[in-house]
Amino acid sequence: MKAVNIQNKRARFEYNLLDKYVAGLQLSGTEIKSIRNGKANLSDSFCSFKGNELFIVGMHIDEYEFGNYANHQPKRDRKLLLNRQELDKIKKKLKDIGLTIVPLRLFINDKGWAKIEIAVAKGKKLHDKRNTIKDRDIQRDIDRASK
């Protein structure tokens, strides 16, 4: 079985990450089979509270190619499984203006469960993004020179 590690590369560029959490996903039907095939996309997704529960919104999991009429909906909201203390801690941090919850990575753990790494994050300003690009270019040049 190949390792599944689906990343949201835009999140690290667009946001300053403050706290990270690993949450389980409440999946239905053929969703886990599509994830194991690497057919998921986190790029336009975010997390939000509905009542006291945390959901991931906009995560796309392709329909399973060998599925039947009971296949899942690709863009439905999926519940994140965290314990109550973690949920309360995240909800408390979101009271600060400008903070959001972004998914970073979707993976399969050792037991075969689908997990998602999320982070409480603050959006970067334009000049911060420029600094990130500049730092990345400098690091790339240093790596090339050292080889």
Image (tube, grey):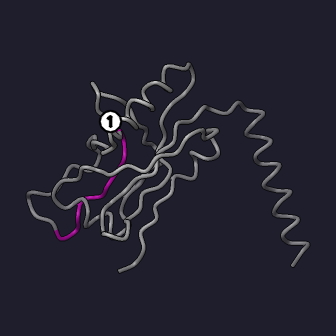
Q: Main secondary structure of the magenta part?
A: loop
Looking at the image, the residue that sits furthest to the right is 145
The quadrant of the rendering that contains the C terminus is bottom right
Q: Residue 121, relative to residue 136: is it above or below?
A: above
Residue placed most toward the observer, 73 or 136:
136
The quadrant of the rendering that contains the N terminus is bottom left
| Residue 28, magenta (yes or no) | no
Magenta highlight range: 57-66
Q: Quadrant of residue 108?
A: bottom left
Q: Disc 1 residue type? A: Arg
Identify the residue at horizontal 60%, vertical 32% (top origin): 122
Residue placed most toward the observer, 98 or 69:
98
Q: Residue 77, relative to residue 134: is it above or below?
A: above
Question: Is label 1 in a helix, a strand or a loop?
Answer: helix
Residue placed most toward the observer, 131 or 114:
114
Q: Residue 38, relative to residue 73: is it above or below?
A: below
Q: Identify the residue position indicated by label 1 in the image.
A: 84
Q: How many badges with numbers are in the image?
A: 1
